[in-house]
């Protein structure tokens, strides 16, 4: 409720529609620039679909690789950028070349090692996955907004 009240402070006029719908739309805007969000009707459906998704990126754990990836791929030093739209930021991450360390980490994390038939290759992939595993708890939309909302881009 506290976060909802803080969000309400940013509205010039109070939302006329159901505030829950406003929050949902804001969340989709922040996380789904591609328009692929699973627009489930129930919260349990949404939770279930999120549980099935494999987290391949951690904004805190991968921060050095995000910064170096932007420098390597685009010549952009994120520490000096005054403003960058969240969608542009996400698109640039998606568009990084496959040789970039961040993309390699994301790709290795996305592999379902159980589907690899060759035992040696499966063990190699699993070893890499253990080395680069995301060790923090999954970040919520709010956590991501809090982390990047305070930065001067």
Image (spheres, grey):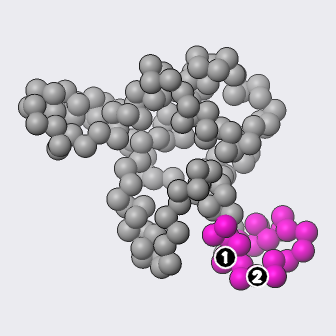
In the picture, the quarter occupied by the C terminus is top right
Q: Which SS class for mark 2? A: loop
Q: Residue at x 42, y 61 (%)?
A: 50
Image coords of residue 33 (percent x, y): 62, 50
- Give the residue number, with chain letter if any, for mark 1: 21
- Residues 137 and 141: in front is 141
Q: Residue at x 40, y 27 (%)?
A: 104
Q: Which SS class for mark 1? A: helix
22 in relation to 37, above or below: below
Question: Contact (CB < 8 A) between labels 1 and 2?
Answer: yes
- Give the residue number, with chain letter if any, for mark 2: 17
Q: Which residues are magenta?
A: 4-25
17 part of magenta stretch: yes
- Is residue 64 in view from this perspective? no
Q: Residue at x 27, y 29 (%)?
A: 128
User: Within 10 angstroms of label 2, few (less than 14), some, or many (20 or more) residues?
Assistant: few
Say which quarter of the image contains residue 71. top right
97 in relation to 53, above or below: above
Image coords of residue 23 (percent x, y): 67, 70
Q: Residue at x 59, y 20 (%)?
A: 73
- Residues 151 and 31: in front is 31
In the picture, the quarter occupied by the N terminus is bottom right
Image coords of residue 106 (percent x, y): 41, 35
């Amino acid at each position: 409720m506290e976060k909802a009240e803080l969000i309400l402070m940013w509205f010039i006029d109070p939302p006329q529609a159901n505030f829950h719908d406003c929050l949902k739309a804001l969340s989709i805007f922040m996380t789904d620039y591609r328009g692929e969000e699973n627009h489930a009707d129930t919260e349990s459906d949404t939770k279930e679909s999120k549980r099935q998704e494999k987290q391949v990126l951690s904004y805190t754990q991968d921060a050095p690789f995000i910064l170096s990836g932007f420098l390597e791929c685009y010549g952009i030093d994120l520490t000096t950028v005054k403003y960058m739209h969240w969608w542009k930021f996400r698109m640039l991450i998606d568009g990084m070349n496959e040789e970039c360390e961040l993309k390699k980490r994301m790709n290795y994390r996305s592999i379902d090692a159980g589907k690899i038939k060759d035992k040696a290759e499966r063990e190699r992939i699993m070893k890499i996955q253990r080395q680069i595993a995301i060790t923090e708890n999954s970040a919520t939309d709010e956590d991501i907004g809090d982390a990047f909302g305070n930065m001067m881009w």
